[in-house]
Amino acid sequence: MGEQKVNIATDQEELRKFTRSLLRDVQALQYMLDNDWFEKDTIRIGAEQEMCLVNRRTLKPANLAMPVLEKMADHNWLTTELAQFNLETNLMPQEFSGNCFSVLEKEVRENLKKIQKTLNKMDGDLVLTGILPTLRKFDLDSQNLTPKPRYRALIDAIHSQLIGTAFELRLMGIDEILVKHDTPLLEACNTSFQIHLQVSPDQFVQMYNIAQTLTAPIMSIAANSPIVFGKRLWHETRIALFQQALDVRTTHEHMRERSPRVSFGSGWLENSIMEIYKEDIARFRVLLNSEVSEDSIETIKEGKVPKLRALQVHNSTVYRWNRPCYGISDNGKPHLRIENRVVPAGPTVVDEVANAAFWIGAMTGMAMKYPDIREVISWEDVRDNFAKAARYGIDTTFTWMKDKKISACDLVLEELLPLARKGLTSRKVKKADIDKYLGIIEERAKRHMNGARWQLRAFSKLKKEVGRDEALTILTACMMKNQREGTPVHEWELPTTADLEEYRPVRLKVEEFMETDLFTVQKDDIIELVAELMEWRKVRYMPVEDSKGKLSGLITSRILMRYFTERNRFNGKEAVLVKDIMRHDPITIAPEATIVEAMHLMRDKKLGCLPVVKDGELIGLITEMDFLRVSGRLIERLEKEH
């Protein structure tokens, strides 16, 4: 959202004024289209690079965006993102020809090098990934929002539209996540490499529909966002997370349809780019307004190109995965772009540029082959492909042209890469660039390996060897190492525990450390059930909760031993039910506490277990075995050092 001076649309007079400006911008845009004002003779490409900022020692998110910007104030290509642990660089538009992609790669690398040089002074580092593995739910607290009025206005405006009581994330992959959050800041999990392709107005409908068709296979081969809060979810979880993070809808008894602000679209584009802008104004209320001094219609009457600021502001609050963009070139002419928002950041710079070359090349090649893509594939199949690719990534089977069923890798190798090569060649892109970047995509497809699949395999392997937090930290460390070396992801080896030089769990919070897959009983259950469950699951502690998940008590193996030693009696009384023997007031700890506090509490009170409770609800469990695993790993590391 590039417009800085915005505010929440609450004042009715300001809102009416802004809405009038918005409608006049629509009229102005239509006039410029009808009267051939747009640039056609030059086609450019561009990109935006988002990144995560982490603490160098812990590899956890670090709120360094504002200090970095302060130190690099003379770099106008660097800008903020929603959260203080993210940054974005805006790359120079390149004419679509020659060595444009290698120039793009060089610029990204140089920008990241400058940022890293500044981060080095702050004990920080940067990571390129769709979703940072070490990101924690509490990192998305509103206090980590970038302190700029436009972000606060956006968050407050979205929150004001919320029909339910909270924003919810519900997803199932290898694991499952069911979590609610009190702000839309969940969106800050996502980092992307946004790609821009300039399109002439007379080709916009054709190219936009092709962009929609290509979204699924591009996403499948580029996916890099499978892990959220230690849960293995979709291959490109950003898709669902972004929609659900900003989804203000709730369930109803009726069947009325309401569109999410984040969407793939509702059908083919038929006649003009104007259909998108008009639909978005019709479907979504104005969230933000801005002081618009320019009257776009009057500007046109003066023969000048209007900035269409009101339309730009509204367009920035509706999130299509293929977003139409209006801009003014350096030569003063207006132009149109399609912005591909589906490609995640990472795994490396060269992987990102390969994704860009593949998408832009395939867009161009497909336009040469299919004057109207709607004649060979249905909208329903395109929409279904999008959903499947987000979930299954490189493992997806698509419904392609004329109802053909084909795997993602076969589609890329057999159809899309030849089209992309033809498209890039037609624009006189240098053969060396074509071979380099399309070669990376080809190898990914041949080896059936992209960032998402590598992360899933790596994390699943590490989880069998170390605790969850250490596994996520090792995973992140290995990603950063490969990024620095510039090795394309299809060549990455799976990480080992040796890939992390130093693990620092001291500052972990209890909620990062606790076990959340709990087995519990209720107070009216029979004692024999508890005994069997503890034997079956090989556990020494069994929390007791009520039907609402509130902690009622705790059963330990020592309590059971006393019960059976006393021959089905406890403290001299006959015992039958859990409530007869359970500890009624177990000592608990809050999820916000540190593991050092938990360790001291367990040591001082001679406890083997600490239920983790928030507002009376049981949400996790910490046992002495959890600390034994961590201390064991630290001892092993010390042993290797000597």
Image: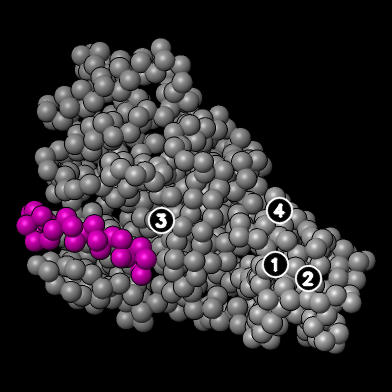
The residue that label 3 is drawn on is 240
Q: Residue at x 55, y 42 (%)?
A: 183
Question: Residue 551: x percent and y percent?
Answer: 71, 60
Give the amino acid at mark 4. Gly
Check disc 2: other Cα within 10 Å, few if <14, some if 14-19, many if 20+: some
User: Which numbered disc, 1 or 4, marks the residue that appears first in the sequence?
Assistant: 1
User: Which numbered disc, 1 or 3, marks the residue that appears first in the sequence?
Assistant: 3
User: Which numbered disc, 3 or 4, marks the residue that appears first in the sequence?
Assistant: 3
Determine the image quadrant of residue 408: bottom left
Which secondary structure, mark 4?
Answer: loop
Which secondary structure, mark 3?
Answer: helix
Residue reaching furthest to the front: 574
User: Which numbered disc, 4 or 2, marks the residue that appears first in the sequence?
Assistant: 2
Are the two marked residues, 1 and 4, in contact with CB atoms closer than 8 angstroms?
no
The residue that label 2 is drawn on is 580
| Image: magenta residue range | 369-393
Which coloring applies here? one colour
C-alpha separation, residue under disc 2 versus residue under disc 1: 8 Å
The residue that label 1 is drawn on is 523
Give the amino acid at mark 3. Ala
User: Is residue 467 shown in magenta?
Assistant: no
Give the amino acid at mark 1. Lys
User: Which numbered disc, 2 or 1, marks the residue that appears first in the sequence?
Assistant: 1
Q: Residue at x 28, y 31 (%)?
A: 281
Which secondary structure, mark 1?
Answer: loop
C-alpha separation, residue under disc 3 versus residue under disc 2: 46 Å
User: Which numbered disc, 3 or 2, marks the residue that appears first in the sequence?
Assistant: 3
Question: Residue 271: x percent and y percent?
Answer: 11, 40
Check disc 3: other Cα within 10 Å, few if <14, some if 14-19, many if 20+: some
